[in-house]
Image (cartoon, rainbow, N blue to C red):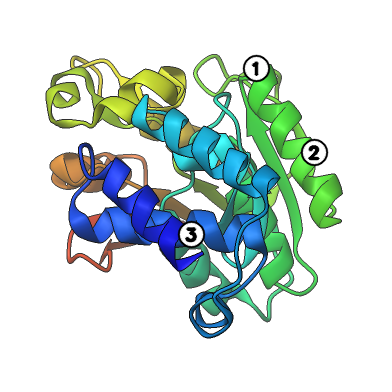
């Protein structure tokens, strides 16, 4: 298996740097073998013919630009195994950060939470799993994404209600009241595409990634309005954001009547999250 790791890494060197090649190769071998990297090094077990075929197929698809998470059909997020396909974004480490922040702050409050633009349901499921007594709903406009989210809820055995909702059109009307709204909405502008990797542009759903250059805050504005309608008094709003528009977002939230606006950096020291409170 050590030889398989070297072989995969060598093949991937044309599209990834050395560190990524080794990391991806190790991950593939660990997942197919069901062994830890330490066990692989110590035991040096050999792959079966079937397992060799699997590694070759995965490597071929990677070389064609397909993300590993879509090839495997799952990824890990906040210690949960989350199913993903090209109906949903692949959850990013930064998004884990906002989940852990909310869990830390709200863990003893049994809050009612709404996750807007839920995608795979990773945020909603992580919060339900991490906050004792929390009641969590997730909404999205994409039927395909909702199917993935509902399947994840069943697989993880996590009681989250997912349903279709168009936040731009505010339809259908939401009758429930919530303590927290959280969202990682589309926030990448069209002009940013040229700096993005091809495997993201060619595989991940653009509806979940991009907004118009002329209206980059459209989802934040609509969700802030929604919060004013359905958040309880002193309810919390948590956003993952585009660092390019942090000042505009802060100004918008102030105009919408929110207070205690907090800009939070991610692990890379970029302005990545905003938290605020409904008056």
Give coordinates of residue 102: x percent, y percent: 52, 68
- The answer to which image quadrant residue 36 occupies is bottom right
Q: Nearer the viewer, mark 2 or mark 1?
A: 2
Relative to 23, is 205 on the left or the right? Answer: right
Relative to 150, is 61 on the left or the right? Answer: left
Give coordinates of residue 12: x percent, y percent: 30, 43
Residue drawn at (75%, 45%) of the image: 152
Q: Which residue is mark 3?
A: 27
Q: Which mark is residue 151?
A: 2
Q: Which residue is mark 1?
A: 171
Task: Check if mark 2's residue and mark 1's residue have beta carbons within 8 Å.
Answer: no
The 10 Å Cα crowd at callout 2, few under 14, some 14 to 19, many 20 or more, is some
Task: Check if mark 3's residue and mark 1's residue have beta carbons within 8 Å.
Answer: no
Q: Secondary structure at mark 2?
A: helix
Above or below residue 271? Residue 119 is above
Q: Which mark is residue 6?
A: none
Q: Secondary structure at mark 3?
A: helix
């Amino acid at each position: 298996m050590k030889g398989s790791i070297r072989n995969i890494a060598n093949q991937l060197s044309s599209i990834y740097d050395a560190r990524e090649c080794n990391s991806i190769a190790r991950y593939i071998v660990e997942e197919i073998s069901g062994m830890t990297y330490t066990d692989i090094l110590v035991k040096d077990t050999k792959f079966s013919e079937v397992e060799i075929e699997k590694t070759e197929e995965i490597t071929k698809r990677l070389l064609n630009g397909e993300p590993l998470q879509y090839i495997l059909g799952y990824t890990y997020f906040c210690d949960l195994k989350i199913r993903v396909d090209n109906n949903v974004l692949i959850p990013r480490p930064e998004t884990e950060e906002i989940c852990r922040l909310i869990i830390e702050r709200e863990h003893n409050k049994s809050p009612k939470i709404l996750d807007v633009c839920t995608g795979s349901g990773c945020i909603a499921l992580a919060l339900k799993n991490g906050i004792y007594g929390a009641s969590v709903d997730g909404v999205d406009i994409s039927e395909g994404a909702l199917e993935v989210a509902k399947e994840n809820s069943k697989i993880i055995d996590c009681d989250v209600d997912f349903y279709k909702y168009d936040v731009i059109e505010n339809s259908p009307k939401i009758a429930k009241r919530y303590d927290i709204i959280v969202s990682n909405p589309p926030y990448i502008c069209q002009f940013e595409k040229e700096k993005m990797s091809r495997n993201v542009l060619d595989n991940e759903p653009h509806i979940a990634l991009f907004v118009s250059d002329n209206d980059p805050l459209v989802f934040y504005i609509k969700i802030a309005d929604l919060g004013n309608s359905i958040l309880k008094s002193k309810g919390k709003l948590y956003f993952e954001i585009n660092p390019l528009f942090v000042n505009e977002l802060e100004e918008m939230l102030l105009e919408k009547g929110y207070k205690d606006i907090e800009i939070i950096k991610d692990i890379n020291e970029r302005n990545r999250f905003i938290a605020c409170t409904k008056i």
